Amino acid sequence: MQTMMKAAVLHQIGGPLQIQQVPVPQPGPGEVLIRITACGVCHSDLHAMDGDWAAQPVLPLIPGHEITGQVVALGSGVQEPVVGSIVGVPWLYSACGTCEFCLGGMETICPKSESTGYTKPGGYAEYMVAPAAFVANIPDNVDLYELAPILCAGITTYRGLKRSRATLGQWVAVLGIGGLGHVAVQYAIAMGLRVVAVDVSEDKLELARSYGAECLINALDNPVETLREKIPGGVHAAVVTAVANAAFEQSVAMLRPGGTAVFIGLPGGSADTVRASISAISGWELSITGSNIGTRQDLNEAVAFAARGKVRAQVVKDNLDNINEIFERMRKGALVGRTVLAIG
Ligand SMILES: [Zn+2]
Ligand SMILES: [Zn+2]
């Protein structure tokens, strides 16, 4: 097996990434070595590179957390997966397994969790290691390039919809039909919800319609008033995947009494706070909740929808060598669907 590999490495906050040769990592106890097939390019990677969050990434960093690939070697003590297994690696690299949150089915907020492509090396490389207990088993005969974004955009929006508590036949607004939102619309439809799509782009709204969204609202045109005209009383739930701050405030104003807004998108920087009506939240018993990627169980469920063809990420394949240009386009909001690095 080769001893050196190509990787995109961040050496200082603010970037750019350097394409260079680094040693192939060796799997330690309980870990597997994965030869990477595909890695999605997520907006969170840009936040990581820009140092937008309070807890800074560990440098030098190989970003990337939407990974599919094949297990090629095992560390000591690993029974499953076996060599040759197709696996996925999500943002949740590991969690402690013993804290009150892990024991309570909320490993997403484990204070000792590690993050792929943030505190641990990620998927912008030919190989990576990951804990065997935290990789997702991927069924054979799925497209590993299309599946890669499900490891982040899929699991994140799927868990967000679960946390909205919207049930069959109820209305959910999806604000932002980008890399996350176009997947959210498909999960919502597959889960029996009725979808209102909200975005500034008519093209993205049309994409949402093609997936089954019944109501399309241009966010530039009084979206709250328009929604309340079209859906009297408002929506049961709103899931915000946009990165524009206004969308978060609008989502709460779109709710019907008892409704829930789920915050998923991350504006970052100075746009990190919202204003909301205390009297509306109190008087109408509204909920605002966050959703942070997902548990391993969420991941298995989210992958199962995709493997059955119920949800497909719209992917554009690109090359690891182009990673800095990809991020320039992302900064301009010029990416359509999900860019996936075709590595293997
Ligand atoms: Zn992500
Ligand atoms: Zn824990």
Image (cartoon, rainbow, N blue to C red):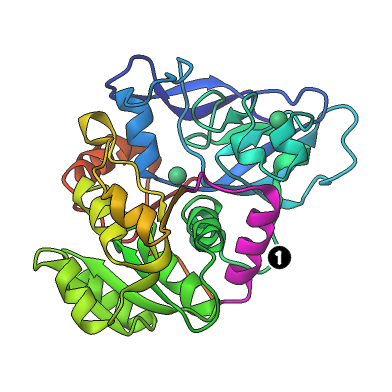
Disc 1 residue crowd, few under 14, some 14–19, many 20+, Cα 10 Å: few
Range of residues picked out in magenta: 290-309
Q: If the picture is divided into quarters, which one holds ligand 1?
A: top left
* The stretch drawn in magenta includes residue 303: yes
* Horizontal side, residue 205 vs residue 105: left or right: left
SS of the residue under disc 1: loop
Callout 1 amino acid: Asp
Q: Main secondary structure of the magenta part?
A: helix
Task: Give the image location of residue 278, x and y in percent.
Answer: 30, 47
Task: Give the image location of residue 223, x and y in percent.
Answer: 17, 67
Task: Give the image location of residue 221, x and y in percent.
Answer: 8, 68
Q: Quadrant of the N terminus?
A: top right
The residue to which callout 1 is attached is 140
* Horizontal side, residue 28 vs residue 91: left or right: right
Q: Quadrant of residue 129?
A: top right
Task: Give the image location of residue 168, x and y in percent.
Answer: 54, 81
Res. 327 in view: yes
